[in-house]
Structures are given as structure tokens and as C-alpha cells.
Amino acid sequence: MSDTHAQTVPFVRDTMLPPATPPAAQSGAVLWLRTNLFSGPVNTVLTLLGLAIVWFLVSHFWDWFAHSVWNAGSLSECRQIIAETWGEGARGACWAVIRERWNQYVYGFYPVELYWRPTMAFGLLFVALVPVLFSESIRIRRIVLGLTIVLTLWLMAALGAPAAWLAFAAVVLIGALAISERNVAWLLVFSILYPLMGVWFLWGGSAWGPVMVLVGPILGWLAWRLLGRLSGLVATVAALIVPLVWWIGFAGGAARDAENLVSLAIPAVASDRFGGFLLSITIGIAGIAMSLPLGIVLALARRSDMFLVKSLAVIFIEFIRGVPLIALLFVASLLLNYFLPPGTTFDIILRVIIMVTLFSAAYMAEVIRGGLAALPKGQYEAADSLGLDYWKAQRLIVLPQALKISIPGIVSTFIGMFKDTTLVTFVGLYDPLKSMSDAVRASTSWKGIYWEPYIFVGFIFFLICFGMSRYSMYLERRLARDHR
Amino acid sequence: MSEDITRRIDRSHMQVSDEVAIDIRNMNKWYGSFHVLRDIDLTVHRGERIVIAGPSGSGKSTLIRCINRLEEHQSGHIVVDGIELTNDIKNIDKVRSEVGMVFQHFNLFPHLTVLENCTLAPIWVRKVPRKQAEATAMKYLEKVKIPEQAAKYPGQLSGGQQQRVAIARSLCMQPRIMLFDEPTSALDPEMIKEVLDTMIELAEEGMTMICVTHEMGFAQAVANRVIFMDQGQIVEQNEPREFFNNPRSERTKLFLSQILGH
């Protein structure tokens, strides 16, 4: 050692090295294959095994897909065509059932002449979602709204929508595009009004119903403004109670009177006519929209210092998570009637939506609680030290970060909930997977067809859920702030 | 380094007034059954620059965290700017908006830009209009010499820059008192100086400051009083020259020999 030291030459760098470009990456298909698939004996064996499994699956199902029949009036006709074309004993998929019964899978037993109404509601849903989901990127907004305009108007026209409604949809959609170009935040007004509008389009009846529902919060706001001068607490309580009193005591009567005075009714469609993806998407969207805020409130309550608030949150979450969803759905369909005052009719879809919302809100709360726990204590302290009160700290500092951390879990919960909407089959609603396929099979011409409807429904579910998953990845990328 | 600092400090505005900024009387705090702070008595006048030193676990951080009630004391009184800290949340929020705090690990809000970090509290707590809050924020970012980083996110800055943003963020609330909780302990040696320079500048403008720090050069140059704590108690306090050259207690001598002796 001492030798080397003795011989060390003093060194001072006189010129600094300029930054150099990194060496060109080696590329090429062969190199990729070697590094990724055949890097060693184990990897090679696994690759070959994987290829064998893929080959087994493809060879097993290929002829079934290849012999697909799209034009036939019944299952027996399908089989006949397959036997004639591919020989006796050949197997083949009979997609003709989808071609003939697609409308039932999409709209359930909704009146055919009113198919355009759910279609319009679905199109306008995207207008309501754009300011919430795509507020950052004008390019994505253009693509989404452009596609929505073209598809909605085309489908509505094809489904025989009246000219007046077609014009209405065109004005709203194109107006939305114009607003999105200027200031997308204004579209939030539409997002807030959309739930009432959507309910009206789907169930029909008098427009005065949703309007009178809307009057509730307006009255609450007025009460809050008027009493705000007296005392903050009184004003807050009044702002909560006035709408409730209005909804329970007066809204129904007011809507009837207004309807008698000036009729704003469109044909009503009862809940038992709903089915298929119309039903699933209605329940799914409503559940998603309501379970997120409820989940946030529950998560905050569970972390609260107040004993009662915390205990109630814990009891609620643990109870809901401990009970199967089907049990809750049975409660919705059977037991709820015992608790409600006699004579009240309470729509079955609404009851199911409430139960599904409560169910996923409990899971949501735990997912968000994880995000809250992952936030460093210093963030809370910094917010405190700046004098932010609890709600401001939560809203401005804690939740934006906690929700961002929880995005994968939140979207997983959404996806799980959307798929769980098929369980409504147990309370007699026509979900697309089980009840609707049974209904299709009930006709003599499609008796005995199993695979094709399930694959079709599964495929649509996959598309929607995959879309949600991709959106969550987009959102995570968009919100990424650190360069670690 | 201390020599270096002393020479260029402008002491013209460093005046201690008679007005009491913080008054702590018989304050005790426990973590469970562990007695962290024992009978603390401390009066801070406006314009004072106090450095609190002591071995780790001596309760120095806990003491200054009690001043804006990040920690709750169990007995005794703490009066800040004439407001006594009790369980009254309104009083606590009021004190917190008057007392700025800088943390060891910066605690910037990573989801907001530097400018948004600085304008958040003025806008939401002080209800300052956005334009005006941004102008104030830029003023303080210039003061800590990083106005060009305003649009970046904290994750894109170096540690020293982040700590200076944290100081600017506190200053944007125009606090009357600043608390520093080991502001340079998490920094690389090269970055300590830029943060200390900012703190010295603040002191030169007459800010009331309490700093928990191990930077004894800073203490000698800027502080008008050094407090030495051990085992949750104030063991010795004196003006810096006396404190460093002529420590009275054995514990202080030992501590000083350990941190200055090499």
C-alpha cells in the first residue's frame, strides 16, 4: 500500500470533460429475443412451455371461432349451416344470437320506439364527464366530444328520435364543444345538472319532478344566505334541513300541481322495463358517482379524533364489509319495505343503487384511508403551521395527495363494483349476464345457447373495465409530480 | 466560518424591544409517562434571535413545536403575541398564522408548484386576492433568490432550494415570529450556507427568531441569546460570547467540547 502512495503522482485536472452522448443501445429482434425469452436454460424452458400452452388453447378454440355463423334465425339453423359448410360434427360459434337479440342485451325491455332516450342520456353522460375527467387536455376533450357528437346524433337518428330531440341533443353537444374550447370549467354546471337530467331521460314522466328536486338545494342556499347573518351554525343546519323538508313534504305535490298547470311530460318507462347494459351502466355510474364522496367522508371520519364519529364510521365500514353484497341486495328488495312507512313506493333500482353505493363506499373508505396513512406526517404539520383549519387542510393539502396515491385502489373498487352490478339478477332485475341470457334462451329458437351470450357480455364488460383501468393509468401519469 | 459570517452582518436593525413576543411559564409536557419538557420558563422579546442547542432527545424541537401547538403542553402557560394557547381552535389557528415555521424536512406540498406553495395560505387563510398573493410570493422568492423556480414543483429542486422555498412560504404569511426546527440538518454541506444566508438576512431585518440548530457559527454570529437544553430542561442560557467562551455548567462544557472540539 505504502508503495502505491509513494508513487502516486499529484494530479490536477486542467480541462473538464464535456458531456458525451450515451452509447447507442444495441437493438434488433434477435437481441430482444435472446435477452427476454432465451436468456438462460430456465427462461428458455419457460418460454417453450408458454408457447405450448398458447398453442394448446388456440388450437383448441380456433375452429370454434373460425366457424362462426352470423346470419341465422335460431340455434338449430346455426348448427345446420355449420354442418353444411364444415361437415358433420364440426363445431362453430353461433353469433347470430347476438345479431338478433343485441337490443335486449343493451336496452333490456325498454320500449323499442324510445331506445333513443337512453342513447341520448349516454351521449350526454360524456359531456358531463369531460370537465371532470379531461379538464387538463384540450386535445383529448376534442376527440371525446367529437366522437360523442357524431356517434350520439347518428345513433339517435338511426333509432328514430323525434326531430325536436335530435335538435336538442345537437345544440347541447355542439354547445358543449364550444364551451370546452373556451373554458371547460363552465361545463361543470352541466355535470351537476346531469344526474337529474339523466334520470328524467331514462324514466321519463314529468320534467317537473327533477325541477322540484332541484328547488330543494336552491331553497337551502337561500336559507343559508338569509340566516348566515344570525349565526353560522343555525345557517348550516337550516341549509341541510330546508331541502329535506321540501323534498319530503312539498316537492311531490308541487311537481303534480305544476304538471297540471303546464304539462312537461314525456312517456314514462317503469323500472321493470330496464335491463341489460342499460341497467348495469345506470347502477354502475350512479354507484361510482356517489360512493367516492361517501367513501372520502367515511375515511376522514374513521381517522377523526372524535370518538362517536370514529366509532360510527368503523361500525359502518366493518359491518358493510362483513356482509355479502347479495345479502344487502336482498335487504334492498325485501326488508326495506318493512322499515319504510306503509304505502311508500320506493323504486327497486333506486334501492339497489343505494345498497351498491353503501357497499362500495365502505371499500372506498378503506382504500382512501390507506392513501391518508401513506401521507407523511410533515404534510399535516406544514398545513397546521400555516394556520389552515381542518377542512381547508384536508381539501387543499391532504386529499389531493391521498387520493392521488389511492387512484389504483379507487379504480379497482369502481371496476369491482361495476362487475358486481350483475348480481342484481338475484333481486329479479335483468342484468345482462344471467337474467338476460336466460330470457334469450327462454325462446324456443335460442334454447341451449350458452357460450356466445356469455362471451359477448364478458367482452363488453372487459371493454368498459379496461377503459377505466387505462384512464386510471393516464391519470396517474398526468398527476405525477416528483422526479424520483 | 463563523469569522466569515460575523464580518458582513449588518446589525443596525437587530434591536430587541421590551415588548414580549412569547411568554412561557412553568410549562411541562409528557409523552405518555415520559417527561419531555420540565418546568420551562422562557420569555422572548420582540426582535430577539434565540438559538436553542442541546443533545438529541433533549426536547429542543418539542419546545418550539409547543409554541405553535404542533405539540400540546399539559401544564403551565404559553402566551404568544398576547394569545394564550389553550384548546380553543380559533386561538390556535390565529397563533399559527402569526408564527412561521420551517421544518427539518422542508415539508413543502409536492402536488403544488413553488408559487402555489407560497400563495396557498395567504389566499385561504388571510383571504388575500390571488394577484396580490402572487406578487407577495414573488417578492419573497426573490428575497430567497429563487424567483426563477416559481413554476417548478418542489421535487425538481435541490434540498437547499426547497428549504429556501419553505422559508419564503412562511414569510408570505408575514409572520411576526419565525421558528426554525433544525433547518439545515437534512442538507448537504454545500447547501447549508445558502439557507443560513437567508436566515441571517431575516435576522438583519429584525425578525423575532427561535432556531433549533447545530450551526454554532450561526449562533455566534446572529443570536443574541443561546439556550442550552438537556433532559427536557433549560440548563444554561447566555449571550453567545459568554456562552461559548465561558460556559458555566459542566453539562454545557461537555457538550461544547464535543461539538466544537475537533
Image (spheres, coloured by chain):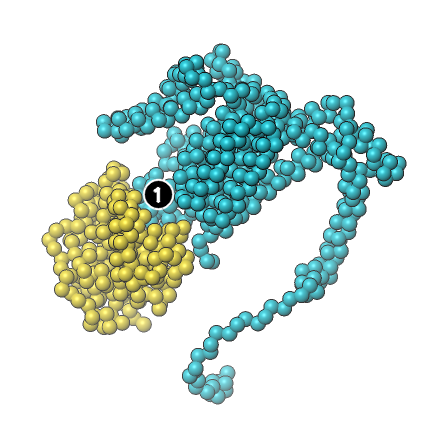
- The residue lying at 46 percent from left, 31 percent from top is A194
* Residue B215, image quadrant: bottom left
Residue B25 is at least partly visible in this image = no
Chain letter, yellow in picture: B
Residue at the far top in the pictured view: A342
In the rendered view, does A445 fall on the left or right side of B255? right
Query: Can residue A63 be seen here?
Result: yes
In this rendered view, identify the residue nearer to me: B7 or A417: A417
- Place residue A92 in its image quadrant: top right
Count neighbours of disc 1 (C-alpha within 10 A) and say few if under 14, some if 14 to 19, many if 20 or more: many
Front one among B29 and B66? B66
- Number of numbered labels in the structure image: 1
Image side of residue A224 versus residue A19, left or right: left
Q: Is residue B70 above or below residue A252?
A: below
User: Seen from this angle, which residue lies furthest right?
Assistant: A88
Q: Residue at x 58, y 42 (%)?
A: A467
Toward the viewer: A403 or B64?
A403
**Left or right: B166 as drawn, with respect to A444:** left
As shown in the figure, which amino acid type bears the numbered disc 1? Ala
Where does residue A414 sit, x and y in percent of width and height? 54, 37
x and y percentages locating residue B35 in the rendered image? 30, 47
The residue where tag 1 is placed is A393
User: At numbered mark 1, what does the secondary structure look like: helix, strand or loop?
Assistant: helix
Q: Which residue shows up at 26% across the image and 29% down it?
A: A228
The chain coloured cyan in the image: A
Residue sticking out furthest to the left: B18
Q: Closest to the observer: B228 or A276? A: A276
Instruction: Kindly identify the residue that appears in the image at 75 percent across and 36 percent down.
Output: A70
Report x, y in % for residue B36: 30, 49
